[in-house]
Amino acid sequence: MTPPLDAPAGASASAAERFPLQFARTRRFSLGVPRQFTVSPDGARVLFVRGTSGTDPVSRLWLYENGTERMLADPLGPDLADEAPGEGPAQEPRRIRPRETASGVVSYATDGAARLVAFTLQGTLWVVRTDGGAPRRIATAGPVVDPRPSPDGSLIAYVSGGTLHTVRADGTDGRPLAGPDGEHVTYGLSDYVSQESIGRSRGHGWSPRGDALLVARVDTAGVRRRYISDPANPARPPRVVPYPAAGAPDAKVSLHLVRMSGERTEVLLPAAAGEDHPESAWTDRTFEYVVAAGWDDRGPLVSVQTRDQRSVHVLEVDERSGGTRTVSRAHDPAWVALRPGTPLRLASGALAVAARPGGDTQGLDIGGTATPPGLEVREVLGAADERVFFTAGEEPTETHVWSYAADAPEEGFIRVSDAPGVHTASVGGPTVVLDSRTPDGHTVTALRSGVPVGRITVLAEEPLVTPRPLALSLDKRELRGRLYLPSWHRPGDGPLPVLLSPYAGHGMQVVLKARTWWVAVAQWFAEQGFAVLVTDGRGTPGRGEAWEKSVHGDRLTVVLEDQIDALHAAAAHRPDLDLTRVAMRGWSFSGLLAAAAVLRHPEVFHAAIAGAASIDRRLYDTHWEERFLGHPDVFPDNYTRNSLLDEAGNLVRPLMLVHGLADDNVAVAHTLCFSAALPVAGRPHTVLPLSGAGHLVGQEWMASNLLLERDFLRKSLGL
């Protein structure tokens, strides 16, 4: 139903009308949010990036010290005025992969003491010191990607044109260090799969002495190419992307120890896992993926994973010979879950690695001590001396910061964060920067020796709609859910059409004790006259290995089953939900889920909006898709069962397909091929192409998307 005539029509109605523009202007309320914290080893300085307001799209570099914030680099200021915010072609993936929404200073790196900071603007290299002075431009061989100062701050390594270079911090003695080896080879950058699916974003790192670097060499000669064009600008040539689709060749990644003398030693990575590797119908023991690589005071430390993802080995590297020794092994009959931040080696030599401490929990082993059963570990954040900091939760809707002192095991595991919510942190010396999202909002607090000593300001705008989630535990599986109702709706007002708005896929939760952008969007749709139900079902993180891996071999069946069960359970709890008018909307995996909902269960779902839907699983990348479905040549039925092209003839409900034409993650081919199959089967549908938009839709489409989706749903459900 639409709001009744006597519903509040003043400020609240006006706010709901203005929300789509606010959503776009604030870029999903991401602007003005401090992020990318670096805490100096002595805990005295904290670096971060942030704009100047909740609508400022230009990120600046900031320093927090002695309780005050000071801007170190302003892309719009006089020192950098000649370098207007933007990016060069080589820098673009550094923003796209982490879903960065701003321009300006979007990433940076520091020396060991966090005194010298290096960053890029439009491919030019700049440095600034935290102890005073204006930013200085450093001459380079070409457009710069990923500059990284040496630990003592005397040198800066960077990548240009696929070649790794170094230059002194005073701008002298610039020279190539590794490369080139041909048009398809890069040194010092990570490959597509490492960035997009594994989470290893960087491809070079310094030795603690600053006399050598651990460098990734990536050869994409054997990887199939994709060509991403811009139909709105036909004179612009297509962008070429080496994209390893499921079952196809990956990039060849090797590691090299490159000394300042130019001498290079290849790391002798093992070729394949041994006899303890789990067997299956498809077994590939080849160590295909470098999932982590770093260099600490004890030498280089590397993790590798097999192509079938059922074995992960942690390797110590001899920096003289390049030889390796396996110090930890993990195996799993489905896949070994990678935990960001692992492995971590302490000064004592103790390792922190992912482990199962007992039962179904995914935990940590820290120097032989396991985290308690039931504490689901999400990420290792780092260490200060022998104290390891990590995020974990006992309840899936909350994530807290924990610590463990390997040199004082009698202290046990200590929870650092208190308030219900989702917390993470950055650490250095005695200082912990606690980044907290709770139902009340977002705060960043500096703790010193556990005591709050100040806050870093969050400038994000408050949403114009006030979220009013009703927490639910649904069905026999106790599915965590949130129900959003219109603020003007009262029991007995009449039935409300239901809109399911999940993600429901691997690696992401949307039912959290935190105020996020999707919570505000859910409430906005509720204000338009819907009961909005959001549910995390099987396959989502936070509830143990069996829960997360229940989608192995089939990513849709149990996920859809959970959404349907949650719908019926919510309706039993709130009889004002109208089960004769039910829709689903989603993006990426949940776009696929929304399309599958109306194709496979039209008796339940009466309309759907599928955004950036990954319709054909064979088109998605190797590491991500083979994790769940195996090799497509060995398990073709898995891919058929999880793709929708052959089901076009089943469509009997209204369906809107939305896709960015410049999407290099879920190619627009998914939507175009499906859209071509629907009329062949005599099935009308709606298509909304977004010109120039990637997987993260730009602000110019955000407001109109919400309005177009609302109008489509209202029409389709007969409002």
Image (cartoon, grey):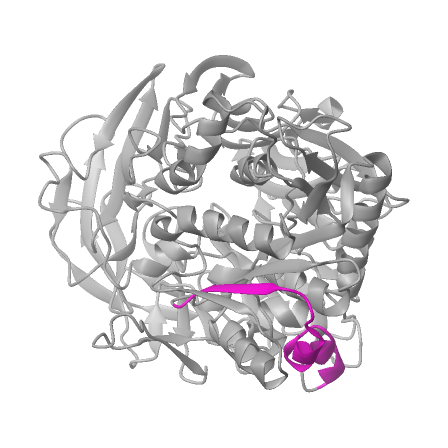
Q: Is residue 651 magenta?
A: yes
* Quadrant assignment, res 381: top right
The verdict on residue 373 being magenta is no
Quarter of the image where one finds residue 188? bottom left
Residue 77 versus residue 499: which sits nearer the camera?
499
Q: Is residue 526 above or below residue 589?
A: above
Q: Nearer the viewer, residue 234 or 625?
A: 234
Q: Position of residue 290 (x, y in %)?
A: 53, 65
The percent coordinates of residue 70 (x first, y second) are 26, 23
* Residue occupying image coordinates x 46% and y 21%: 11
Q: Quadrant of the N terminus?
A: top right
Residue occupying image coordinates x 20% and y 61%: 143
Give x and y (percent) for residue 657: 53, 65
Residue 376, can we see it? yes
Which residue is rendered at x = 63% and y = 59% of the image?
608
The magenta span reads: 634-661
